[in-house]
Amino acid sequence: MTAVTFDERRARQVLWAACVVIGLGLYAFVLRGADQPEDPYIQPAASTTSLPAVPPPGDPSRVPLEGFDEVAVSVRPAGDADLLSWCLLAARSAEQRSRGLMQVTDLQGYSGMAFLYGEDVSNSFYMRNTPTPLSIAWIDAAGGVVTTADMAPCEDRDGCPTYGAAGPYRSAIEVFQGDLATLGIAPGATVLVGGTCAARS
């Protein structure tokens, strides 16, 4: 049997204490989730602008455009007017955004279409194969209106005019030409895109 010196005993005690501390730390951070909710999730960054909650918008008889989602939009027009809310078709994927309102002449109960991006972009829009005159508003991450434009129809051909925002934007809203005012979307308005529309009948 090998004799254990005082220094060796002390080293073993320190090692044992360190293991206990590490074990408790792992328990707290891994097993208990570091005091987070039982089912933690990543929360989206808080918007710099918030609007009061409103009932879900939307015509119950609306008919979705095949291949598209829908999204609620809340608008606080300039001058602190009453809050407005609308239900729009939602183009979330690159394929949906590329198609947009091509060949559409009837929105079937929707107020327009929202093009949604996960980050600031500066892409231009065009009206190829789009028979209906449209108006567009580009919206920044804080809900501000970057700029608006009217867009003329163009045949299914190369060389259609392009329309761009005056700066980076996070979403764009297309409506039949002249309808932005009806939605309250104009410079100075706050536009928050996101939420659930009313149930369809």
Image (cartoon, grey):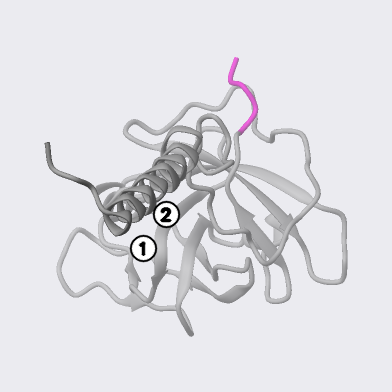
- Say which of 77 and 180 sits in front: 77
Mark 1: amino acid = Pro
- Residue 175 horizontal/vertical position (percent): 53, 55
* 26 shown above or below 178: above
| Residue at image coords 45%, 78% | 168
Please give left or right for residue 186 compared with residue 2 in the image. Answer: right
- Main SS, magenta region, reads loop
Q: Which residue is drawn at 77% across and 50% down?
A: 84
Q: Hey, what amino acid is under mark 2? A: Thr
Question: In this figure, what is the number of numbered marks?
Answer: 2
Above/below status of 182 relative to 61: below
What residue span does the magenta drawing correspond to? 197-201
* Residue, disc 1: 153
What secondary structure is marked by label 1? loop
Q: In which quarter of the image is the C terminus?
A: top right
Q: How crowded is mark 2: few (under 14 residues within 10 Å), some or many (20 or more)?
A: many
Residue closest to the far bottom = 166
Task: Pick whichever of labels 1 and 2 is earlier in the sequence.
Answer: 2
Q: Mark 2 points at which residue?
A: 132
What kind of element bears circle 2? Answer: loop
